[in-house]
Image (cartoon, rainbow, N blue to C red):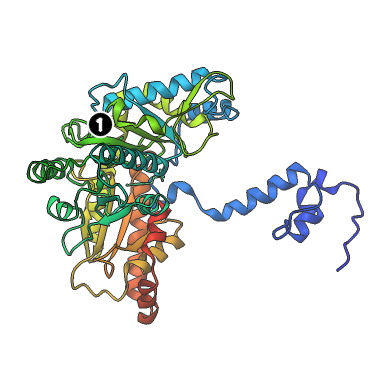
Amino acid sequence: MSEHPDTRTQPEEEDPYESLMARRGAPKLRFPAREADPRLAYALVHDELLLDGVARMNLATFCTTWAEPEVLALLAESFDKNIVDKDEYPQTAELETRCVRMLADLWHSPHPHTTLGTSTTGSSEAAMLAGLAAKFRWRERRAGEGKPAERPNFVCGPVQVCWEKFARYFDVEIRQVPMDPGRYLMEPEQCLERCDENTIMVVATLGQTFTGLFEDVVAIAAALDDFERQRGIDIPMHVDGASGAMLAPFTAPDLEWDFRVERVKSINASGHKTGLAPLGCGWAVWREQHDMPQRMIFNVNYLGGEMPTFNLNFSRPGGQVVTQYYDFIRLGREGYARVHRATYETCAHLAHQIAKLGPFEIVHAGDPQKGIAAVSWTLADGANPGYNLFDLADRLRAHGWLVPAYTLPPHLDNLAIQRILVRHGFSRDMADLLLADLERSLKTLAEHPPSKSLSEREVGSFNHDAKAAVS
Ligand SMILES: *Cc1c(COP(=O)(O)O)cnc(C)c1O
C-alpha cells in the first residue's frame, strides 16, 4: 500500500493523532528507520500503557504503588546518579551506608556499625548474594577440614521463585519441604530430615509468598542447635524477609526472627515492598563482617578512587537508595509502625467481611504476629458453589481489581488459594469498594455459574511458578 501524502506540513505539530505513525500504528516488528516527534512518540507509548490497568488496584503485588510527592521529587533529582560510582557521588554512597547500618540496628546485629550489607535491585539479587556468601563460607570450611565441597545443597520451605533461580543459576541443590494438608510452612522436623554436611544454609521465609504466613525462625534454629549437638554439623540460617523484615520490627517487635537468633547469618528485604521505597530497591545485610566472605568483594579503581563492590550488577540507579533513606528519616520507627498498623487494620476488616461473603476458609487473616499484611483464603473444604477462585478472580478483574487465584506448590497443588496484599495507600474506603465488587461478583457467579469444563481446565493448566513470579 502506498503512503498517503500529507496535505498539510508537519500536522503532528498541531495534533499528534494526525500523523502517519498514529494513523498506521507505531513500529512493532522492525527497528524503525526514521525519527518521530517526541510528542507523538510519547502519546503512543502513554496511550498503550492505559491498558496496563491501575497499579494501586493490583492487589497481587507486594510492591510500592504509592509514594509521597517528596519521594517522586528526590527520585527525579537523582535519576542521573549511578550508585556504583561511589567516588563521583560520595553522598549517595554515604546514604547507602547509613541505610545498611540502620537496618543492621533494626535487625539487632551485634555490630551494626561495622557489619556488611548492600543495596540491591530487590530481594532476588539480595537472595543470590546471601546464597553465594553461604556457599563460599561452606566451601572454605570444608576446605579447612580437608573434605570435598562439590555437592552443596540448601533446605527451605515453599519459597519464592528467586530461591529456585539461585539453585539453578548457581548449581546448588534445593531441598524444598513440600506443603501438606493443613500445613503451609516448613516446620523443624521436615527441615532436619533434609539437612546434612553439604547443607550450606537453611532459608526461612518471613512472609511466605503463597499465604503471607511467617515461618518459625526460632523453632527452626532450635532444631538446628539440636542437630549440631547430635551430629556436629553447624548449619547457618538465612531469613528471606522480603516483605516481613521491614514490617515485623514495627508491628511485632517482640517476635524473634532476626539477628537476635544467633544462627541467622544474613537477611534480605525488599525496600520496594514494606520498606516503602520505589521499585528497584532491595537489601542484603550480614550478621557480622566475617559472615560476608572477603572473596566476594571486588575492588575496582576505574571510576576514580578505590571502590569495593559485591553486587551482581554494576551500574544501578541511585534514586532508590536516596528515597529509602528519605523514608527512614521521614518515618522513623513511629511512622513505619503507623503506616503498617493501618494496613493490618484493613486486613482484619477484609478478612472478617470476606469470611461472611462466601464459602471461604481464611488461611491468613493478617494477624501481625503470624504473617504480613495480607489476607488469603481457599474454598472451604467440601464447598461446591458452582464456581472456583479463578472464576472469582476473573469477575473481579472485570471491575478493575487484580486479586489473583493460584494453585499451591506440591503437595497441595490441587488446592487453589486467593490472596490480597494490603499496602500503604490502600484505604478503608478502597477496601469497602473492593468488598462491594466482591459481593457483586459472587452474586453474578451464583446466578450464572461458569461452565464446569472451563473451570477445570483453568485449574489444570495453571503454573504456580509463573504466578508466584508475578509478585
Ligand atoms: C517478593 C519476594 C521475593 C523477590 O523479591 P523481589 O524484590 O521482587 O526481587 C523473594 N522472596 C519473597 C518471600 C518475596 O515476597
Which image quarter holds the N terminus?
Answer: bottom right
Q: Give residue 361's position: percent from left, percent from top.
A: 20, 61
Q: Nearer the viewer, residue 105 or 170?
A: 170
Q: Is residue 147 visible?
A: yes
Q: Which quadrant of the structure image shows residue 182?
A: bottom left
- Looking at this rendering, what residue extends furthest in the front direction? 146
Question: Compared with residue 36, is residue 141 higher up or lower down, i.e. above or below?
Answer: above
Residue at the (51%, 53%) spot, across then down: 53
Q: Is residue 144 left or right of residue 426?
A: left
Query: Looking at the image, which residue is at 37% across and 59% down?
Result: 404
Check the image and report above or below for 133 versus 195: above
333, 261: nearer the viewer:
261
Q: How many labels sit on residues? A: 1
Nearer to the camera, 73 or 123: 123
Image location of residue 246, percent across then percent down: 31, 35
> How dense is the environment of label 1, judged by Cα within 10 Å: few (below 14), some, or many (20 and up)?
many
Specify whether tag 1 is near ligand 1 (CB below 8 Å).
no
Q: Position of residue 398 (x, y in %)?
A: 46, 62
In this rendering, position of residue 319 left or right of residue 344: right
Q: Which residue is mark 1?
A: 250
Q: Amino acid at mark 1?
A: Phe
Residue at image position (81%, 47%) is 12
Q: Secondary structure at mark 1?
A: helix
Residue that appears at 70% across and 60% down:
29
Asked whether residue 449 is in view, the answer is no
